Image (cartoon, helix red, strand yellow):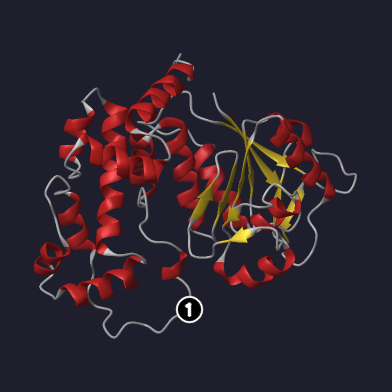
């Protein structure tokens, strides 16, 4: 069973605490069994006992028997949003995060929790994400970190940073996808009534003038295209389906998703390739055909660029990870 420690400090926002608890602390039908072992860990209470309630907001308190010791021992440590992005995080939390990382834990920040993670020095020289509203302040406080305010999350393997609020769901689904595979993440996303993988990034949420029309949705077009990934779809094909010009479609697409039609298609094809690599023994050239990437060489090139490893290595690593997962009792 994979263990997750959720760091709780005084004044933290509720949403960032609730999402990991809902995702990792709830047994659900149709998901791998055993699931995660979630421990809510109280850190930085100024000498108080770990069992004392932690007031995350004036009307909400977390009661937990776990503290820094359990956090350091976890496989994954999640740091929710900071109570005060202009203040310094608790020294006890900083020390615990450094020790957990030294022992091999995966450290994850949600929203403005990137400020806490940056204070540990673990993000120095790396790219990171946080809520776009805090981009200027983050850059000022932590100039050694390369902030990208346009993405939903950045994953370095040992350290992962997520963007604001609802991006917490994207980050948690990404962790499930990395730990248990695409099928488990997709099943969980359906149960949460959330997209398994949102296209685009924070760019679609940064303040900008509203488009002239708000009554037209790309959802039917995206659904139509997702069912035809094996076909050689072009921007012209999508534009004809949407009854518009390629230029107008590109403009609408960027406003709705933060990316281009071709990049969205490529992302969907890579996601489909991951599913097929995880769920069966189809040869790579057949997977390339089913995903609309044509040849095995083309799949290898695009898959390696997007995921970081070739398809064969990805399948081998996924099978090895599955073999290490304890069997259900």
- Residue 255 is situated, as x and y percent measured from the top left of the image, at 33, 73
Q: Residue, x 20% and y 51% (percent of image)?
A: 226
Q: Please report the residue visible at 74 percent of the width from the left and 51 percent of the height from the top.
A: 9
Q: Within 10 Å of the Cα at label 1, are there few (<14), some (14-19), or many (20+) other Cα atoms? A: few
The x, y position of residue 32, in whole percent, is 41, 27
In the image shown, does 43 or 118 lie closer to the viewer?
Answer: 118
Q: In front here: 281 or 8?
A: 281
Picture quarter containing residue 43?
Answer: top right
Residue 252 vs 260, above or below: the answer is: below
- Residue identified by numbered label 1: 207
Residue at 45% of width from left, 23% of height from top? Answer: 321
Q: Residue at x 36, y 48 (%)?
A: 196
- Tag count in the figure? 1
Question: Is residue 212 or residue 252 the one in the foreground?
Answer: 252
Which of the 4 quarters of the picture holds residue 145? Answer: bottom right
Q: Position of residue 104 (x, y in %)?
A: 66, 30
- Please, is residue 301 above or below residue 10 in the view? above
Name the image quarter holding the N terminus: top right
Q: Is residue 168 left or right of residue 236?
A: right
Tell me the quarter of the picture where residue 220 sits: bottom left
Secondary structure state at the residue bearing disc 1: loop
Q: Is residue 299 left or right of residue 140?
A: left
Left or right of 148 on screen, residue 65: right
In this rendering, position of residue 295 left or right of residue 166: left
Quick one: which residue is furthest to the right in this view?
Answer: 47
Percent from the top left, x then y, of residue 59? Answer: 70, 60
Tell me, yes or no, if residue 81 can be seen here: no
Can residue 193 be seen here? yes
């Amino acid at each position: 069973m994979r263990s997750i420690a959720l760091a709780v400090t005084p004044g933290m926002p509720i949403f960032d605490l609730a999402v990991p608890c809902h995702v990792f602390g709830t047994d659900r039908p149709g998901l791998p069994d055993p699931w995660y072992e979630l421990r809510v860990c109280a850190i930085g209470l100024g000498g108080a006992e770990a069992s004392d309630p932690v007031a995350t907001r004036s009307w909400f308190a977390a009661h937990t028997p776990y503290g820094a010791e359990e956090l350091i021992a976890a496989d994954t440590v999640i740091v929710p949003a900071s109570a005060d992005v202009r203040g310094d995080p608790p020294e006890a939390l900083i020390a615990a995060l450094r020790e957990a990382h030294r022992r091999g834990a995966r450290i994850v920040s949600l929203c403005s929790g990137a400020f806490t993670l940056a204070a540990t020095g673990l993000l120095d020289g790396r790219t990171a994400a946080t809520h776009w509203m805090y981009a200027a302040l983050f850059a000022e406080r932590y100039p050694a970190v390369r902030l990208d305010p346009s993405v939903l999350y950045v994953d370095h393997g040992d350290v992962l940073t997520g963007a604001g609020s609802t991006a917490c769901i994207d980050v948690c689904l990404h962790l499930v996808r990395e730990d248990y595979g695409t099928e488990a993440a997709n099943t969980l996303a359906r149960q949460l009534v959330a997209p398994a993988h949102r296209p685009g990034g924070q760019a679609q949420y940064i303040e900008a003038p509203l488009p002239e029309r708000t009554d037209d949705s790309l959802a039917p077009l995206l659904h139509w295209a997702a069912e035809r990934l094996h076909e050689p779809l072009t921007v012209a094909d999508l534009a004809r389906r949407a009854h518009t010009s390629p230029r107008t479609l590109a403009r609408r697409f960027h406003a709705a998703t933060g990316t281009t039609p071709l990049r969205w298609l490529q992302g969907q094809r890579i996601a489909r390739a991951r599913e097929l690599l995880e769920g069966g023994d189809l040869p790579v050239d057949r997977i390339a055909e089913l995903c609309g990437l044509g040849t095995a060489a083309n799949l290898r090139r695009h898959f390696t660029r997007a995921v970081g490893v070739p398809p064969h290595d990805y399948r081998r690593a996924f099978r090895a990870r599955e073999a290490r997962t304890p069997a259900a009792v």
